[in-house]
Amino acid sequence: MIKENKKQLMTGSKILIESLLKEGVDTIFGYPGGAVLNIYDELFNYRDKLNHILVRHEQGAAHAADGYARATGKVGVVLVTSGPGATNTITGIATAYMDSVPMVIITGQVPTSLIGNDAFQEADTVGITRPCTKHNYLVRDVEDLARVVKEAFYIASTGRPGPVLIDIPKDISSNVAEFDYPESIEMRSYNPTYFGHHVQILKVVDELLKAEKPMFYIGGGVISSNAANELKEIAEMLDMPIVSTLMGLGAFPSEHALFFGMLGMHGTYAANTGISNADFIVAIGSRFDDRVTGKVDEFARKAKFAHIDIDPSSIGKNVKIDIPVVGDVKSVLNSMLEILSLKSKEIESTQYKRMKWLEELNMYKYEHPLSYKMTDIIKPQYVVEKIYELTDGEAIIATEVGQNQMWAAQFYKFKNPRSLLTSGGLGTMGYGFPAAIGAQVAYPDRTVFDIAGDGSIQMNIQELATAVQYNLPVKIAIINNNFLGMIRQWQELFYEKRYSFSKLNINPDFVKLAESYGAVGLRANKPEQVEDVLKTALSIRKPVIMDFVVAQEEGVYPIVAPGYPITGMLLV
Amino acid sequence: MMEKNHILSILVENESGVLARVAGLFSARGFNIDGISVAGTLEKNESKMIISTYGDEQILEQITKQLNRLINIIKVQELTDDESVMRQTVLVKVNADDSNKNEIFRIREIFEARIVDVSRNAYVLEFSGSAKKMEAFIELIRPIGIKDIVKTGTIAITRSKK
């Protein structure tokens, strides 16, 4: 007998799925179509190992995988067909790219023999997605498939995370090859820097101890690198005040005495005034976005800057940095902790300075806290506050984009990292609901909310069918003002109240809409009904839409006019 | 900050789409490409791109960092005038009749250009030199009557350490 050394021959479809299993994937979000039928046929054999969530629109699949990834820290996986299947995911991919979310998107492609022929459902998917992926692949040989999957997961989840797309022509998914999954991977042209330069880190620590008014300005990178504990330890050790970007919320407990809120366009008075008076700012996993800095030439002019980021291109892009530290936030903070552990005397000597500085910041906090006026019409902020109270800050909160997003950011006091799912960079309306679905798939027993507007919820409302089909009890709180609220607010403030096409004259009856999908619909018209509606919704193990009919012309405050310095806040 | 020309030498993995990635990055982020030249190296999986671009130090730093983010890019290096040899090559087809042939020969001699194609009333000249010499060469050729001209972008290589 001839000894059989050969490994088993498998089709590309089987190789793909086996590779996903090797990467620890247990859930994928997808939608079948012609070019992925081979893969779907093989998927049928793996029903007990791979949970496939059938969405109702490919954009929903991308956002759901994104929400799953943000909530868990794992790579979110999407499977869609060629052409329109792929193009429908673009918004979701771009959303994930802007917010550095690890995802692998698998798209079908027409057979290699037809590529470039304008074949049915053909699109140049790698060409279209090149600018909005961290990397992408067109697999031209089934022999390459396993390696490509390995690389894709490696690239998506390491360094500054991001979406990676794999385009698989139909003949590749039926061709056969030996399955040999690479154990490890080495890429000559891709080596993220994890450990910060020791001398630079020493400089940061020195400057922190010398400074009169130092501050941490944290962003989503703290969450991506799972560094919330290190951050808390260091902040408490040094009595360091913290302000956060939208993406950083949850990385540090919002109710902590050292936390002064979100900064930027809708930042708190304390955060914006505080950072403007700081003399040393350490940006940690944040990127000086224009919504954060306002007029960038006037941003925190009294301060020296240090910047800790794994992506060198983020450092010095918008603001000149005095002490750059390229490295993983968690690893750099750990190095700082190590250095600081030998400096207890020096730390002690900063206590008085720190006390004075915190006093100043607390004064700002008490002068102008976030506030709103109760009336006999429901205020959006009140709804968010009630959600916070009833969930004890422990819920996963997805948001759409606009006023609903800013109110959620301001009035929900996040306790834990990975509990806010929001499209910060791209600002994608329609993101929140499918993202909430993704998070609920990952955590069936946690409370997951989508705080939505009546405009944005309609951008992916079709996913209600997905939520009902998989019995995902997502709670959708629609802040219904019959307007595109943020547009209306800008038109009010900056365009002389010319409400050009921002009024939604016709909305569906959201209660009946929910019911027609087999979900539950509830409505609150008066402030005193808000709590009851929320309690009822929380008691039901089904998807629930809550229609909160709110004050139509409520605005998000503070607000900084675009292009102005962040000290120039309109407070009410 | 002072804006000036910069020459970048970019070593890339020879994979399909890598030129599109680099070109796309420049256009998406609003950087300029004044010239580009791409060809294989001695390694079969590598290519080298030489890109001439324009901007101040901060823009150059961003270009370099953004290029390094691309997965297929192995190394990005700025080549400076002092430390490298830079050349452009031109093929120029000029009118050639009895009245100007002598002038063409004279210019060819001064610049050490070559005549690589001859027909009854046109010559094709080949010249290779620094950007400055290239400019001077073309200026002198121009009055003779240029029928067609093709120029490469700059290519460059570092000088050996002395």
Image: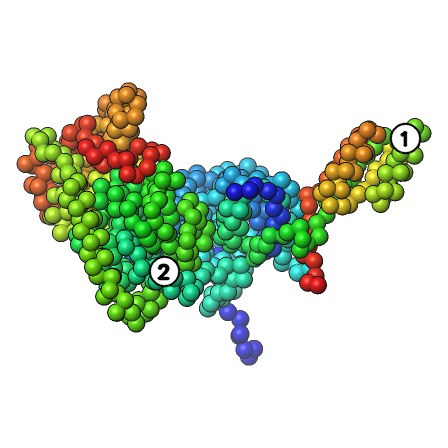
Q: Where is residue A43 in the image (x, y as percent from the top left)?
A: 38, 55
Residue at the right extreme of this rendering: B98
Few, some or many C-alpha atoms within 10 Å of disc 2 (few <14, some 14-19, many ≥20)?
Answer: many
> Camera-side residue: A400 or A513?
A400
Q: Please state if B49 lies on the left or on the right of A465 as rendered.
A: right
> Camera-side residue: A73 or A204?
A204
Q: Please state if A365 lies on the left or on the right of A494 as rendered.
A: left
Q: Quadrant of residue B114?
A: top right
Mark 2 belongs to which amino acid?
Val
Residue at the left extreme of this rendering: A528
- B142 w.r.t. A443: above or below: above
Q: Which residue is drawn at 66% across and 60% down?
A: B43
What is the C-alpha distance between the residues marked 1 and 2?
70 Å
Q: Do we see residue A213 in this rendering? A: yes
Q: Where is residue A245 in the image (x, y as percent from the top left)?
A: 30, 47
Residue labelled with disc 2? A204
Q: Which residue is drawn at 7% across and 41% down?
A: A532
- B46 w.r.t. B93: above or below: below
Are labels 1 and 2 on one chain?
no
Q: Which residue is drawn at 54% across and 62% down?
A: A188
Residue at the bottom extreme of this rendering: A1
Few, some or many C-alpha atoms within 10 Å of disc 1 (few <14, some 14-19, many ≥20)?
Answer: some
Residue labelled with disc 1? B100
Label 1 secondary element: loop
Q: Please state if B35 lies on the left or on the right of A542 as rendered.
A: right
